[in-house]
């Protein structure tokens, strides 16, 4: 069995991880204490053991590690509804916060906990018969989420090499909504710090998801729980084929192979459809054609940017539920004919498809309605330049005045690292710009 380890880092990562495991348990029929709700629920299918490990007492423990440099959020898990589900050793919390400071998470406070975290990861990895990779949940803007994540990923590369995939699920800084003044610094530094060590980074931003909650779910004032449950549906769809046998499965390595044309171009956009409230669900058809077209619209995208302003390099379409290949092929053909959806000339195929029979589950009394089928689209598009460009602009405004820099330098960072990181981000923007270049070199025809 090809197991995956989930690593949740910082407040955002831990809270998203919480929502994901709540949903996984619902999908697999596992109770809050780790026991099977129905004895025959998943006994016939061993694929779920990619995410859960069976104990001697017949309980199922998530293959998951939670890390935060201060204990408040992890303490909520220790005393919460799911306290019986997680192994206590896999909940690691410190006593001193990273205080929204990348340097504290990376150089001082975070470094003290690195060996302990790596040891827990090593023990969890040793229990796996064939470790496929790591799923890392974090935010780009927080201190622990940015600083400690890039430190840990560096160490994971040293320990496990490139053999095990490292996929990030990252909360990217939103254009107008921000929870920290120094968010641009942290985000640019972690983008630079983890660039070489991450194989693929699926990005979401809070503002885009707030918009989705207001438009589609009629929640006037969404809470983080609302946002996290929506992100959990996306993560669940991405991991469905790892946890359930299906018609056309997609494993972790296939995401990279099909979505990442060059090692640095590894920031796909996530889109999900249908997102619908219980009140509206009775009035829609949710055909394969409808949900496919919906995923290419700006309103379904989980990052605040306009996909029509760029060109697609690759799309990974992950269908689940009552879906047949004939409908998928017809839906993709009709999408290709739309003038607003443009692909780069050097990538003629463009689509990777996954189909799984497991219909999406929903949390009881949650915001989302139960639907017969759903689609999660991961697209590598040059439109992602827009969020990078916004972030670079905010970074430059502060860095010209050297505002707040002393907090970072005081923790042992060098000022030169800021310049190096922002240059790397600018180069990344240029790399995406070059991807739009349609000239295909005729000399390549002879190969």
Image (cartoon, grey):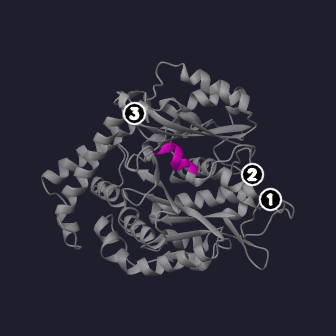
Task: State the mark number for residue 245.
Answer: 2
**Residue behind mark 1:** 45
How packed is label 2: few (under 14 Cα within 10 Å), some, or many (20 or more)?
A: some
Q: In this view, does 322 lie above or below 105?
A: above
Q: Are marks 1 and 2 in contact (CB under 8 Å)?
A: yes
Residue 271 drawn at (x, y percent): 53, 39
Q: Name the residue under label 3.
A: 444
Q: Give the range drawn in magenta.
A: 254-260
Query: For the residue carrying disc 1, how many other residues have a C-alpha within 10 Å: few (<14), some (14-19), or many (20+)?
Result: few
Using the numbered discs, state the Cα–Cα distance from disc 3 to disc 1 in whole angstroms: 47 Å
SS type, badge 1: loop
Mark 3 and mark 2: Cα distance apart in space: 40 Å
Dot 2 falls on a residue whose secondary structure is loop
Report the side of 375 relative to 379 (left or right): right
Mark 1 or mark 2: which comes first in sequence?
A: 1
Q: Position of residue 238 (x, y in %)?
A: 60, 49
> Residue shown at 46%/44% (left/top)?
268
Q: How crowded is mark 3: few (under 14 residues within 10 Å), some or many (20 or more)?
A: few
Residue 99, image x and y in percent? 33, 68
């Amino acid at each position: 069995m090809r197991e995956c380890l989930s690593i949740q880092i910082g407040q955002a990562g831990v809270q998203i991880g919480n929502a994901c495991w709540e949903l996984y348990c619902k999908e697999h029929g596992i109770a809050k204490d780790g026991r099977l709700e129905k004895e025959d629920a998943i006994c016939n299918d061993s694929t779920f053991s990619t995410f859960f490990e069976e104990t001697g007492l017949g309980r199922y423990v998530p293959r998951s590690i939670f890390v935060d440099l201060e204990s408040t959020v992890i303490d909520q898990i220790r005393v919460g509804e799911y306290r019986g589900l997680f192994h206590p050793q896999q909940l690691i919390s410190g006593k001193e916060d990273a205080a929204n400071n990348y340097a504290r998470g990376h150089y001082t406070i975070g470094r003290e906990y690195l060996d302990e975290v790596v040891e827990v990861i090593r023990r969890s990895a040793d229990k796996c018969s064939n470790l496929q990779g790591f799923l890392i949940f974090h935010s780009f803007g927080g201190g622990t989420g940015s600083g400690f994540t890039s430190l840990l990923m560096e160490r994971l590369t040293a320990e496990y090499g490139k053999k095990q995939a490292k996929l990030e699920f990252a909360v990217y800084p939103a254009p107008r909504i921000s929870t920290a003044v120094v968010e641009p610094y942290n985000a640019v530094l972690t983008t630079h710090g983890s660039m070489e060590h991450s194989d693929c980074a699926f990005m979401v931003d809070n503002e885009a998801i707030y918009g989705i909650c207001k438009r589609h779910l009629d929640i006037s004032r969404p809470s983080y729980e609302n946002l996290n449950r929506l992100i959990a549906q996306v993560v669940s769809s991405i991991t469905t084929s790892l946890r359930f046998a299906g018609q056309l499965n997609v494993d972790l390595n296939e995401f990279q192979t099909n979505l990442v044309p060059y090692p640095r171009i590894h920031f796909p956009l996530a889109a999900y459809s249908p997102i619908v409230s219980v009140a509206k669900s009775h009035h829609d058809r949710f055909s394969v054609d409808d949900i496919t077209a919906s995923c290419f619209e700006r309103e379904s995208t989980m990052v605040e940017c306009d996909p029509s302003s760029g060109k697609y390099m690759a799309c990974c379409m992950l269908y689940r539920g009552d879906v047949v290949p004939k409908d998928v092929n017809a839906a993709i053909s009709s999408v290709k004919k739309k003038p607003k959806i443009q692909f780069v000339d050097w990538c003629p195929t463009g689509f990777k498809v996954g189909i799984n029979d497991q219909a999406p589950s929903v949390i009881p009394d949650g915001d989302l309605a139960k639907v017969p089928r759903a689609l999660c689209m991961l697209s590598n598009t040059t439109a992602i330049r827009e969020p990078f460009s916004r972030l670079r602009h905010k970074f430059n405004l502060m860095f010209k005045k050297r505002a707040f820099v002393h907090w970072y330098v005081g923790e042992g960072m060098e000022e030169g690292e800021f310049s190096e990181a922002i240059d790397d981000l600018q180069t990344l923007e240029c790399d995406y710009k070059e991807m739009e270049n349609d000239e295909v070199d005729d000399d390549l025809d002879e190969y």
